[in-house]
Structure formats: C-alpha cells, structure tokens
Image (cartoon, grey):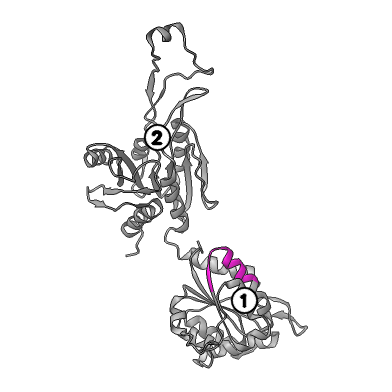
Amino acid sequence: MLKGKNILLGITGGIAAYKIPLLIRLLVKEGVHVKVVATPSALDFVAPLTLSTLSKNPVLTTFKNESNNWNNHVELALWANFFVVAPATANTIAKFANGVCDNFLLACYFSAKCPILIAPAMDLDMYQHPTLKTNLKQLEKFGNKILNAPSGELASGLSGEGRMEEPELIFEAIKNHFEASLPLKGKKILITAGPTVEKIDPVRFISNFSTGKMGIALAEHAANLGADVNLVIGPTKASSSELINRVDVVTAEDMYNAVHQYVKNADIIIMAAAVADFTPATSSDKKIKKTEQTAKTNELVIQLKPTKDILASVGKIKNKNQLLIGFALETHDELKNAKNKLAKKNLDYIVLNSLNDKGAGFNHETNKITLIDKNNNVKNFELKSKVKVADDIFNIILTKHFTKK
C-alpha cells in the first residue's frame, strides 16, 4: 500500500527528534521514498548522517547546499504525496498558522499541495496554552491533520500532555491516510486463478499449462487498491503476498466449492482460472498398469465426464450489485467465441486471450488482451506484462463503476 509513495518528513527542533530515525526506518521498509527537511535546530537533537543514511537522501535544511546549488522547495513540495512534520514545535506551529516563512522547512510547507500530518511535541504548559490551541485549530481549518500529543513523562521532568506521538503510531496514521483514500477500500473481491488437476490415478492427471500468474497479478493489484481479496487458486508454484487470503485447491470440484463459499459477499468476481472442462468418470487408487488387452489394442480408453461450470453457476446467482468478469482463452474465432461466452454466462465483462498472439496466454510473463463489456463494446490492448494488464483491467473497473459522480 505504501510502496512507491513519496513522503516528505519535516523535523523541527524538539527533543523528540531523536525518535524520528525509527519512523524513517519503518517507512523505508515499506518501500516508501523518504526525503527529510529539517530546521537547523532540529539537528541539535538528531544527527544528519543518521537521517540521510536511513532515508538514502541528503537532509535539507537551507535554500542552498554545500556546493552552493539551489534546493528547490517548490519542486520538493510537489514531489511529495504526503508531508509529515514530527516533531512540530510550538514555534513552527505558530509560523504555519500565521504565514511566517523564514526557513526551508516552512517554505516547503507553504508550497505543499499534498495532505499534511502534524505531530506536536512540547512541554505541558506550552501545549495547554490558548495560543497554541488556537493555532492548532487554525491548521485544522487549513485541512491539516493534527495528531494529539499524548500524556506521559516530558523532558522537563513534568508529566502530562505534550509528548510527540510514538513513531509506530505516526506510521499507523500515515498508513490509515493512504488506506482511507484507496478506491476499493471496504470492497470484497473474489478471484480465481491457475489450473485445476483432475486425477486419473495416483501418478497421472489431466490439467493445463496455466501458471496462475495473471490471476495473482489481479489479486495483488486489487489488494493494493484497498480491497479485501479472496484468491481461489489451483496448483501452482507462483507465490502471492500476505495481503491476500489465498485458498489453494486442486480439482474443479474443489474450486467450485471454494468459489461458492465466498461469492455471496463479493462485490467484484474475476474468474481467471483455467478450469478443466472434463474430469475422469472414475479415478483409480492404484497406478493403472498395462494389461493384455491394452497391449493387444495399444490403447487405453479413459471415460470423461463434464466438470461443474463454475462461471455459469456464478452468472446465474449474481445480483445486480455484483460485477462478474470472465476470461476466454481461444485459438480460433476468438471474438465470436468470447462474445458468445459473455452473453451465455451472464457476464459484465470478458477478457479475451488468443493463443495466436505471441507472448499471450500460458507460460508467459506477458499477456495481450481484448476487453469486451456486456454491451459488446470492444477495447484492445497491446502486449505488456501481466502486472500492467491487471492495471488496465482495474482502470476500466474503477472508471466505469467506482468513480464518484
């Protein structure tokens, strides 16, 4: 969720600045790009070498660096997805609230267009002073988020409100901000992926070449958009993140049962699995041996029976608020077959793959898709990585169904 985000971290001259390296470490471990701006007095409490080492970026305190090059506060402020000021002293808070801009950190604040989180830190009497309370209220009116300063032992020896919130809780507040802004937050998504395996005997089976990577890419993308994801997946070596509730199954029957366990509460259902259409009518508990009859005829006949049509079964029971998306892997008459499947199985969209397209289908890191909606509108996409294909599919979903009007 936080991976790839740009967070600008402002540090002012309070004793709590010594705790900020832990916050930087937590953010960097999540894949966040962190840049630090500090007031000169902040560096009396925390070493710039520590901050720059952990953030992997130089610490900026002035408008010019050591090489006499300009540090562009506007560019830095526009770079940030989120601006955190911790600790924020009474002095800096007063300047934020009253438009005083006399250092580099303040210039970044007044140039920022991203959300801002402020974590006050000061002594008890300062935190209780009516001027400070007025300034905090003014910052809230500006749209800034203020973390309350909890009670505890203070640097002065007093005990009471004024401590900076702990780095772990500041980190959680940052996560909560990005979670709340995720477009699929609170939505439940069911995705199927991978092959199914239909047993002939203990050593032989019927299956296909699906790796499950397309379905996993979709599940990962949905989770990163804030959704609660249930991934029902057939046998595959491909891994998935801990953000996803992964349900491993083997047979088409297993997948049918798992899907119907989760489908009722799903807002979006994406059926990307390559489910076997047939399974052996009977399977042997022992390895099937050649017999005199098979040796004479040089053939073994295995009777097959149809598996349950999972996609059709979901199409029959889905309600008007559920979005159902199926996949079609075709070798001929691709568009015609996909449109027939779309209508027959009551889908909202179908994603068409053609094995005639180089780099598409099974055993590839790439895919080339055509997306068709229930009104037979067709959108073609170029060959690209399966991760980017997942992005294309969800962009359509979000634009058409989850954009606030």
Provide the residue designation for mark 2. Answer: 275
**Which residue does the image show at 44% across and 58% down from the upper left?**
225
Q: Is residue 387 above or below residue 92?
A: above
In this orientation, does residue 243 appear?
yes
The three-letter amino acid code for the residue at tag 2 is Val
Up the image or down, 118 lies above or below 169; here it is: below
Which residue range is magenta in the image?
Answer: 22-34
Dot 1 lies on which element?
helix
| Label annotation for residue 244 | none
Q: Secondary structure at mark 2?
A: loop
Name the residue at the front extreme.
67
The residue shown at (52%, 18%) is 287
- Where residue 51 is drawn, which disc sits there? 1
Secondary structure predominantly adopted by residues drawn in magenta: helix
* Mark 1: amino acid: Leu
- In the rendered structure, the answer to whether residue 353 lies left or right of residue 37 reads left
Disc 2: CA contacts within 10 A as few (<14), some (14-19) or many (>=20): many
Q: Is residue 165 visible?
A: no
Image location (x, y in percent) of residue 231: 47, 45
